[in-house]
């Protein structure tokens, strides 16, 4: 009865763990959750005021599918100001979060049997959307020796005549690693002369710690032409529930077909969210973004130090985003069992590394207050000590 396509999908481990943690809390159990990728800060007042104004002004009708003109202009302005990228408003589509943008891209681009190169660890959604589009995920394994980033050599060896797309995420969910300009340039050299599209997920670009962020499309004209930049406001401006993401590409044909797809699926995104996003894109809440970034940076430093003090665990300090990707291989090579027991025994919810394509790790979100982080890591240490006893 069900379609073959829908049966290729796996449930999100991130959502599953978060749901289990909520259920245990509802039962009265003492649970600390570090599973969700969601800032613990509120949406800035300026954005909320703009949304309230839009409601009071009656801005509640349908809009153009890709977004209202002033929104698309604000996105184009942001990309030029922050990233040095020259997009016309017509090169941009606003969607219901970056996940929706990526879905539109996969559906528009991938044919049955097309290969999509995905470095692991990866965001859980990447291979699932590729499979749903009848494509073939080609996973490139990475590890701590190169800060969980693929090399140009690895990319070259993975490319076949069937390769259609490369998905990059910088900064990375779940590792926090960031591709440097020189690393992106090396990747760009490998791709020259091919028709491979690059989907560059840059959702965490504002949350970086002591390193410089480089937009993939800014590397060269060749990379600009082949890159679809995917971004949004969920993480940097604490707008997860507002559902706002966007993509940009100079490929007019690709933009046109994604526009057509969105017109027949969701149509425009929430009209109120469109108005609310404009001040954030125009830089009007940059001070609050910096406040959040500074807080995350301090948490990253302390959480990394505390986690590395636990005998049997190790973690690299993240360069961006708000996660630790913790190595548990000295304790267990079954991250699902490890995380289930951690939740049941000491009430700490984290996400198994296998969900991100890398066994022997778990993802720990430090998007919560420092006292909760300290208590959570104390409980993890207690659990590990019990496992080693």
Image (cartoon, grey):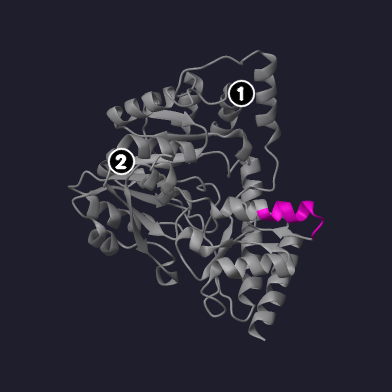
Question: Are there few (<14), some (14-19), or many (20+) residues within 10 Å of tag 2?
Answer: many
Helix, strand or loop at mark 1: helix
Q: Which residues are magenta?
A: 20-29
Magenta residues, dominant SS class: helix
Q: Quadrant of the N terminus?
A: top left
Q: Nearer the viewer, mark 2 or mark 1?
A: 2
367 displayed left or right of 85 = right
Q: Residue furthest bottom?
A: 389
Mark nearer the N terminus (2 vs 1): 2
In the rendered view, tell whether residue 3 sits above or below residue 185: above
Whether residue 316 is visible: no
- Observer-nearest residue: 88 or 14? 14
- Observer-nearest residue: 250 or 219? 250
Which of the numbered marks, if any, corresponds to residue 272? 1
Q: Residue at x 56, y 50 (%)?
A: 207
Magenta stretch encompasses residue 317: no
Q: Residue at x 28, y 38 (%)?
A: 225
- x%, y% of residue 121? 45, 60
Alpha carbon separation for disc pair 2 and 1: 32 Å
Helix, strand or loop at mark 2: loop
Q: How many marks?
A: 2
**Which image quarter: residue 382?**
bottom right
- x%, y% of residue 321? 55, 54
- Observer-nearest residue: 193 or 8? 8
């Amino acid at each position: 009865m069900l379609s073959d396509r829908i049966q290729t999908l796996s449930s999100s481990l991130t959502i599953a763990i978060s749901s289990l943690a909520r259920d245990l809390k509802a039962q009265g159990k003492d649970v600390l959750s570090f599973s969700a990728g969601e800032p613990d800060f509120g949406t800035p007042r300026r954005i909320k005021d703009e949304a309230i104004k839009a409601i009071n002004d009656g801005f509640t009708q349908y809009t153009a599918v890709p977004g209202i003109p002033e929104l698309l202009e604000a996105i184009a302005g942001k990309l030029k100001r922050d990233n040095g990228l020259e997009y016309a408003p017509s090169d941009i589509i606003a969607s219901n979060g970056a996940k929706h943008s990526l879905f539109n891209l996969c559906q528009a681009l991938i044919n049955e049997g097309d290969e999509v190169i995905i470095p692991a660890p990866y965001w859980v959604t990447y291979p699932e959307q590729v499979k749903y589009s009848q494509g073939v995920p080609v996973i490139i394994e990475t590890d701590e020796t190169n800060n969980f980033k693929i090399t140009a050599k690895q990319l070259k060896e993975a490319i076949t005549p069937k390769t259609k797309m490369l998905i990059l995420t910088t900064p990375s969910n779940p590792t926090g690693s960031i591709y440097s300009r020189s690393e992106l340039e090396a990747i760009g050299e490998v791709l020259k002369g091919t028709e491979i599209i690059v989907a560059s997920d840059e959702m965490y670009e504002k949350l970086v710690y002591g390193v410089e962020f480089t937009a993939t499309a800014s590397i060269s004209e060749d990379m600009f032409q082949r890159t679809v930049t995917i971004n949004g406001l969920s993480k940097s401006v604490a707008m997860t529930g507002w559902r706002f993401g966007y993509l940009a590409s100079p490929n007019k044909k690709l933009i046109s077909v994604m526009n057509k797809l969105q017109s027949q699926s969701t149509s425009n995104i929430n009209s109120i969210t469109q108005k609310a996003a404009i001040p954030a894109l125009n830089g009007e809440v940059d001070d609050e973004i910096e406040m959040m970034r500074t807080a995350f940076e301090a948490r990253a430093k302390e959480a990394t130090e505390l986690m590395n003090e636990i005998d049997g665990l190790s973690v690299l300090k993240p360069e961006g985003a708000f996660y630790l990707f913790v190595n548990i291989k000295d304790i267990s090579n079954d991250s699902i069992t490890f995380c289930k027991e951690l939740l049941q025994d000491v009430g700490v919810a984290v996400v198994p590394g296998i969900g991100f394509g890398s066994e022997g790790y778990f993802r720990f979100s430090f998007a919560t207050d420092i006292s909760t982080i300290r208590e959570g890591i104390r409980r993890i240490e207690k659990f590990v000590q019990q496992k080693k006893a």
